Amino acid sequence: MKKIIIIATFAVAILGSSFTASATEKDPGTNREPNLKVKIAFTSEFRQAADVQWSTTANSSVFLAKFKFNNEDLQAFFTEEGEFLGTTRQIVKSQLPVMVASQLDKQYADSHVVTIFEYSKPEGLEYYITLTTTKDTRIVKASPNGEISVYKKNVK
């Protein structure tokens, strides 16, 4: 169950852009090497990246680069045309903006935080937080100013 929640959370982080497939779902085309446009776009965004591993989303329309940058594990997403869609990274609650952490404590005091993904895209930041209680599991979406909404809810 925890693995499904983590995969779902990661997929949610990706959904903010123009595609809907999870980057963690494997199919025969997922290990396709990116074209030159994508590699150039990646290098211009992340000059100091190390240990880069490429894959594609399940529908093979978006390239995913997993890499180390400033000693952090990141994932970056690019279209086949080299358009940068954004990055995701897993963070801990203490790394959330104060307004988000405060609202999370107020609105979901009875919940346990399972995972938090920060989705950084050209339009701004979003946070996807997986929470569990004895009754349900939910993914909430938060903006840096503390606005929180339920993205997905599953009753146990």
Image (cartoon, rainbow, N blue to C red):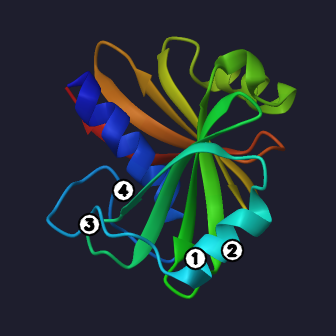
Most distant residue in the left direction: 28
State the residue at coordinates (29%, 62%).
31
Q: Nearer the viewer, mark 1 or mark 3?
A: 1
- Identified by mark 2, the residue type is Ala
Q: CA distance from mark 4 to mark 3?
A: 6 Å
> Hey, which quadrant is residue 46 in on the image?
bottom right
Question: Mark 1 vs mark 3: which is more N-terminal?
Answer: 1
Q: Percent from the top left, x then y, of residue 61? A: 38, 79
Q: Is residue 36 above or below residue 53?
A: below
Using a 10 Å C-alpha cutoff, classify the residue at mark 4 as few (fewer than 14 neighbours), some (14 to 19) or many (20 or more): many
Q: Which mark is residue 1?
A: none
| Contact? badges 1 and 3 (CB < 8 Å) | no
Residue nearest the viewer, comparing 114 with 59: 59
Using a 10 Å C-alpha cutoff, classify the residue at mark 3 as few (fewer than 14 neighbours), some (14 to 19) or many (20 or more): some
Q: Percent from the top left, x then y, of residue 114? A: 45, 20
Q: Which mark is residue 38?
A: 1
Q: Which mark is residue 23?
A: 4
State the residue at coordinates (42%, 41%).
9
| Contact? badges 2 and 1 (CB < 8 Å) | yes
Q: Is residue 91 above or below residue 120?
A: above
Position of 127 with respect to 21 (left or right) is: right
Q: Nearer the viewer, mark 2 or mark 3?
A: 2
Which part of the image, by quadrant, shows the C terminus?
Answer: top left
- Identified by mark 4, the residue type is Ala
Label 4: which secondary element: loop
Q: CA distance from mark 2 to mark 3?
A: 21 Å
| Contact? badges 2 and 3 (CB < 8 Å) | no
Q: CA distance from mark 2 to mark 1?
A: 5 Å
Label 3: which secondary element: loop
